[in-house]
Image (cartoon, rainbow, N blue to C red):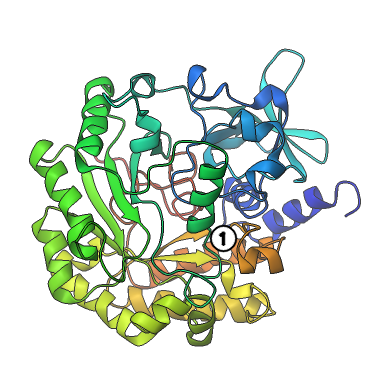
């Protein structure tokens, strides 16, 4: 790429898609391609003033730990906030995905003030999350709160990955873009603590610490998640395994947080169990809409459940949770991943929009994570650049348009919508929706 070419690409897209907030253009580019960190911008891990990256489920990096240089020893911040600069950016929360060779770089200037640089030019100020008080306390076992119950989205969401591996294992079953199993292995290899199955009592103890020290009540929701369970874990099937954490949390802290579960699309009786245990929002992720790509890129899900049955179960679950509280995720960008993906942005957007229309016509609002091509996954290896930025920008436009077509508003459990307000950090879907109208007092 010639000098300044990334800047030219970004500015061209801002001009061509004026209805997509300019903040979202930068955010999508940082999420899809990663960001480099100057040593001046790294954290002092759990001993410092900055909240470090917790690796809460996937690596979300463009290199393995050994390839990240100093960023493997001193973790980068969990998230960054962009503001100001020549584009006058409104406050934008971005999940950190490390890529030492990215054209974007976070560094401190001579006054020690952090900024984001693109093609060598400072494009915004960078804020980093302060170390939360609850991260400074350990469990009785000596484990850190960050290991058991990290928070993301600027403290809004407690992320409980209670099962760190996935029972879809190996090339014939693992989703082709997912590095959950590798991320587990690399943390083990680096000697980092990374608990495989989290003890329910330890989860409650970590939540107790968060509840005690989060006096501003910034943490509003928790997500229970982990790998797919095709057999059992600790003698429990998937609904019971994830559900028994929710039951324990709701009994100990009734109504303190919005409870969400990310699990497979399960049969109706299993979904009913989640609801009975006190879960409020269900995320049965459908990953990618196109029929052929689902088979190719989600072979385990295709084999154990199948795409049509998966979709049927999503619609069924709306009868139990209410359509607004069923929010399936898809991985935005894998539609264009070689070897099987669409080769044009037009085709990819048309396919994804068909999926959005299918669900939104039933009152279900999907959400998405911007695909990070992690290098230990088949699709990451084959597509180190990810999907084109134009795909991501047009998706934001199509997403908002489809919501308007069906008269839907932003889904619950994601914090506030609107550029400058959103905290959801792994895609810009909340940044690009209209801000809530202030309610008249």
- The answer to whether 244 appears left or right of 190 in the picture is left
Q: Is residue 156 visible?
A: no
Point 44% across, 49% down: residue: 57
**Residue 21 at what x, y percent from top left?**
57, 50
Indicate the quadrant where residue 387 lies. bottom right
Q: So how many labels did they put on this image?
A: 1
Q: Residues within 10 Å of mark 1 (few under 14, many from 20)?
A: many
Front position in the image: 1 or 193 = 193
Point 68% across, 28% down: residue: 115
- The answer to whether 404 appears left or right of 209 in the picture is right
Point 48% across, 49% down: residue: 431
Q: Is residue 151 visible?
A: yes
Indicate the quadrant where residue 386 lies. bottom right
Front position in the image: 205 or 212 = 205
**Residue 308 at what x, y percent from top left?**
35, 86
> In terms of secondary structure, where does tag 1 sit?
loop
**Residue 347 at what x, y percent from top left?**
61, 82
* Image quadrant in which the C terminus is located: top left
* Image quadrant in which the N terminus is located: bottom right
- The answer to whether 263 appears left or right of 427 in the picture is left
Point 54% across, 81% down: residue: 296
In the rendered image, the residue lying farthest to the top is: 111
- The answer to whether 388 appears left or right of 278 in the picture is right
State the residue position of label 1.
Answer: 371
Asked if 245 appears above or below 354 in the picture, the reply is: above
Indicate the quadrant where residue 377 lies. bottom right
**Residue 245 at what x, y percent from top left?**
19, 48
């Amino acid at each position: 790429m010639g000098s300044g070419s990334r800047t030219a690409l970004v500015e061209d897209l801002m001009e061509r898609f004026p209805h997509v907030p300019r903040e979202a253009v930068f955010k999508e580019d940082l999420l899809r391609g990663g960001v480099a960190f100057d040593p001046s911008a790294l954290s002092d891990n759990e001993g410092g003033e900055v909240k470090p990256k917790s690796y809460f489920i996937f690596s979300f990096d463009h290199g393995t730990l050994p390839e990240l240089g100093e960023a493997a020893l001193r973790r980068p911040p969990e998230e960054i906030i962009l503001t100001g600069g020549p584009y006058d950016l409104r406050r934008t929360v971005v999940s950190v995905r490390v890529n030492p060779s990215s054209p974007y770089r976070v560094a401190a200037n001579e006054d020690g003030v952090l900024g984001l640089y693109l093609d060598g030019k400072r494009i915004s100020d960078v804020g980093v999350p302060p170390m939360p008080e609850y991260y400074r306390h350990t469990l009785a076992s000596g484990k850190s709160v960050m290991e058991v119950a990290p928070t993301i989205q600027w403290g809004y969401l407690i992320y409980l990955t209670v099962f760190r591996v996935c029972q879809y294992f190996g090339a014939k079953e693992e989703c082709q873009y997912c590095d959950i199993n590798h991320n587990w292995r690399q943390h083990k290899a680096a000697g980092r603590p990374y608990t495989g199955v989290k003890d329910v009592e330890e989860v409650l103890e970590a939540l107790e610490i968060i509840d005690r020290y989060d006096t501003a009540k910034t943490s509003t929701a928790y997500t229970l998640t982990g790998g797919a369970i095709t057999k059992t874990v600790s003698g429990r099937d998937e609904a019971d395994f994830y559900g028994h954490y929710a039951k324990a949390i709701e009994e100990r802290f009734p109504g303190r947080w919005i409870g969400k579960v990310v699990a497979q699309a399960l049969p109706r009786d299993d979904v009913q169990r989640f609801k009975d245990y006190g879960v409020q929002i269900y995320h049965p992720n459908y990953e990618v809409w196109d029929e052929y790509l689902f088979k190719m890129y989600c072979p385990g899900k295709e084999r154990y459940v199948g795409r049509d049955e998966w979709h049927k179960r999503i619609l069924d679950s709306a009868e139990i949770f209410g359509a607004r509280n069923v929010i399936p995720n898809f991985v935005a960008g894998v539609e264009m991943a070689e070897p099987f993906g669409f080769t044009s942005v037009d085709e990819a957007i048309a396919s994804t929009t068909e999926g959005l229309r299918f669900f939104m016509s039933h009152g279900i609002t999907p959400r998405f994570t911007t695909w990070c091509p992690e290098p230990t996954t088949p699709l990451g290896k084959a597509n180190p650049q990810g999907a084109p930025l134009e795909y991501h920008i047009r998706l934001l436009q199509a997403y908002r348009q489809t919501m308007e077509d069906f008269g839907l508003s932003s889904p619950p459990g994601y914090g506030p919508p609107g550029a400058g307000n959103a905290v959801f950090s792994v895609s810009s879907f909340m940044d690009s929706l209209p801000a809530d109208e202030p309610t008249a007092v």
